[in-house]
Image (spheres, rainbow, N blue to C red):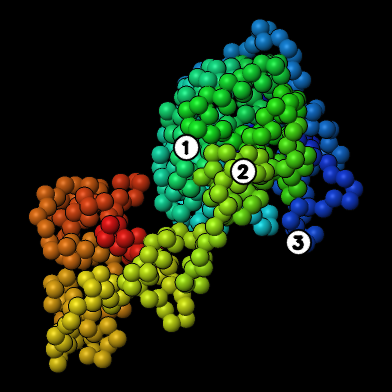
């Protein structure tokens, strides 16, 4: 999410000064310090945070005009002539696009695909998140999860004319990576009523469910980024914008059973609506700085803070000020309001401590790993770890299937069936059992290669044989597993059973190694 200046009235000279810093990082009292900043060295100056603006005018004064100077005051005449602009078919703005334009930055700058980001600072405490749009079509969700991201918003719609073609992948892949995710709608109050846009949003991915992994829909109401709609307030009066917002909020609540969250910036809200009427709504506030600054009328604090549009995460970077359990409650609780996520909701029950010290609460596939341990299929390592990111070795895979079968008695031969598996190997019994059951044949050179990682296609074969090699009419489900592939039938069966869905790009990636955390999920799906 990003705010932008409308292109037709943008003042290039103002943009090259401290415009952005004053717009999104309001002045602080003399005794104020950066929020959650443990050391002065982490403070970020306007020049550091927004180098593009300063590159245009390195001699800009250090006392920029107040942010109101960058925003055209409401003109109160929605019928005045307006310049021709984009057709709705060409309109697509990301969260915060208007603020970027206001600051002389690209409205929809992409930070996906390994681009070096300009900002590395993150607030201390709380929970980190991100938001994306069609301008970030290829996000490494697993990589962001490993960097600490636990929630994400993806753009679903804009006005009543645009649907994000990347939304389904972004919404699903962030969930599969272990994140709590939600959808957002970029409001264009000049292209459809609030009720019409709420219906369009919900019909195209903006709904909500109380599964604890779905955030409420997010209404992105901000600076007008389109020239043809006039001033920054869309040439609408405060009364008109208040009525439009109420129409959207009421309709969304009727359709989903809860209010949407609101995304905005204090400067824009003050200029264009100036009301405390919506201060019960959860607030997602844009303020690109190391300090949040003042709140819009009626709010005492933010719920989510969009603190950077230039990293460290793809798209925009966000911060939820509560705990991870608070975030889960906010996601589940339809009565949650600004600053009170547990309102009218049963007291949060403390989560049991993880049995593995490297699988804390919030870890992707934690519930599946805990289930795997509770059923006795895994014991973890003697140092108390599970090592979820490690690849599954072939000897460990033998142990998994043996325990899945109930750890039956095995007639052990005096001589090993594999020349690289000694009779005193810790998993000798399990490997022999796997061979006797026909789940593995080993390699043609007489080895089992117990230390090798298990590939995804070999995993499919093991599951298929463990199930008794059932009859199956194989179909081509993945573009990288064509008919005639070594494990074509086994991979097709695995997908038909719902054990795998493959990747969002239509591939299965048969040669990739399977990780221990993902294996826990595959086993649970098979058993259920």
* Circle 2 or circle 1, nearest the eye: 2
Q: Residues within 10 Å of mark 3 (few under 14, many from 20)?
A: few
- In the rendered view, would you say 87 is above or below 526? above
Number of marks: 3
Asked whether residue 10 is in view, the answer is: no
| 246 left or right, relative to 524 | right
Check disc 1 and report the residue beneath it. Answer: 208
Residue at 37%, 69% (x, y): give it. 374
The spot of residue 492 in percent (x, y) is 19, 52
The spot of residue 358 in percent (x, y) is 50, 70
Residue at 26%, 73% (x, y): give it. 403
Q: CA distance from mark 1 to mark 3?
A: 37 Å
Query: Which image quadrant for residue 427?
Result: bottom left
Residue 191 vs residue 323, the one in the foreground: 323
Residue at 50%, 65% (x, y): give it. 352
The spot of residue 30 in percent (x, y) is 90, 48
Residue 331 vs residue 239, the one in the foreground: 331
- In the rendered view, would you say 113 is above or below 294? below
Please tell me which of labels 3 and 2 falls first in the chain.
3
The spot of residue 52 in percent (x, y) is 69, 41
Residue 62 vs residue 428, the one in the foreground: 428
Q: CA distance from mark 2 to mark 1?
A: 18 Å
- In the rendered view, would you say 215 is above or below 13? below
- Secondary structure beneath disc 1? loop
Check disc 3 and report the residue beneath it. Answer: 38
Image quadrant occupied by the N terminus: top right
Check disc 2 and report the residue beneath it. Answer: 343
């Amino acid at each position: 999410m990003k705010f932008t200046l409308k292109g037709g009235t943008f003042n290039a000279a103002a943009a090259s000064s401290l415009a952005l810093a004053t717009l999104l990082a309001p002045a602080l009292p003399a005794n104020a310090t950066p929020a959650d900043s443990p050391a002065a060295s982490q403070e970020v100056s306007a020049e550091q945070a927004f180098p593009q603006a300063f590159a245009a005018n390195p001699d800009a004064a250090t006392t920029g005009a107040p942010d109101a100077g960058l925003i055209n005051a409401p003109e109160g005449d929605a019928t005045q002539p307006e310049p021709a602009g984009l057709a709705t078919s060409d309109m697509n703005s990301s969260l915060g696009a208007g603020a970027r334009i206001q600051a002389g930055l690209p409205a929809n700058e992409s930070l996906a695909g390994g681009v070096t980001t300009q900002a590395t600072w993150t607030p201390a405490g709380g929970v980190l998140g991100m938001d994306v749009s069609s301008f970030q079509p290829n996000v490494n969700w697993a990589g962001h999860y490993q960097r600490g991201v636990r929630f994400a918003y993806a753009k679903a719609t804009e006005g009543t004319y645009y649907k994000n073609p990347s939304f389904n992948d972004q919404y699903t892949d962030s969930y599969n990576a272990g994140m709590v995710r939600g959808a957002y709608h970029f409001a264009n109050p000049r292209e459809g009523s609030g009720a019409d846009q709420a219906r369009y949003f919900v019909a195209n991915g903006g709904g909500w469910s109380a599964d604890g992994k779905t955030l409420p829909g997010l209404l992105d109401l901000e600076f007008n980024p389109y020239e043809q709609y006039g001033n920054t307030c869309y040439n609408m009066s405060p009364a008109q914008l208040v009525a439009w917002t109420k129409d959207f909020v009421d309709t969304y609540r009727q359709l989903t059973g809860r209010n949407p969250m609101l995304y905005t910036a204090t400067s824009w809200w003050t200029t264009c609506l100036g009301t405390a009427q919506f201060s019960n709504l959860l607030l997602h506030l844009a303020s690109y700085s190391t300090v949040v600054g003042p709140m819009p009328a009626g709010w005492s604090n933010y719920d989510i803070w969009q603190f950077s549009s230039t990293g460290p995460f793809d798209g925009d970077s966000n911060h939820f000020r509560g705990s991870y359990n608070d975030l889960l409650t906010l996601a589940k609780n339809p009565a949650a309001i600004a600053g009170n996520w547990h309102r009218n909701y049963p007291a949060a029950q403390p989560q049991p401590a993880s049995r593995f010290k490297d699988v804390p609460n919030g870890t992707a596939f934690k519930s599946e790993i805990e289930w795997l341990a509770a059923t006795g299929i895994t014991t973890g390592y003697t140092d108390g770890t599970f090592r979820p990111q490690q690849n599954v070795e072939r000897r460990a895979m033998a142990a998994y299937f043996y325990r899945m079968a109930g750890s039956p008695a095995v007639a052990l031969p005096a001589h090993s069936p594999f020349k690289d598996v000694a009779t005193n190997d810790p998993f000798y019994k399990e490997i022999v059992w796997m061979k006797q059951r026909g789940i593995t044949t080993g390699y043609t050179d007489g080895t089992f290669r117990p230390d090798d990682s298990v590939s995804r296609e070999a995993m499919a074969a093991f599951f298929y044989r463990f199930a008794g090699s059932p009859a199956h009419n194989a179909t081509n489900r993945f573009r990288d597993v064509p008919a005639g592939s070594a494990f074509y039938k086994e991979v097709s069966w695995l997908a038909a059973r719902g054990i795998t869905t493959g990747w969002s790009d239509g591939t299965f990636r048969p040669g990739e190694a399977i990780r221990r955390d993902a294996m826990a999920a595959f086993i649970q799906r098979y058993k259920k």
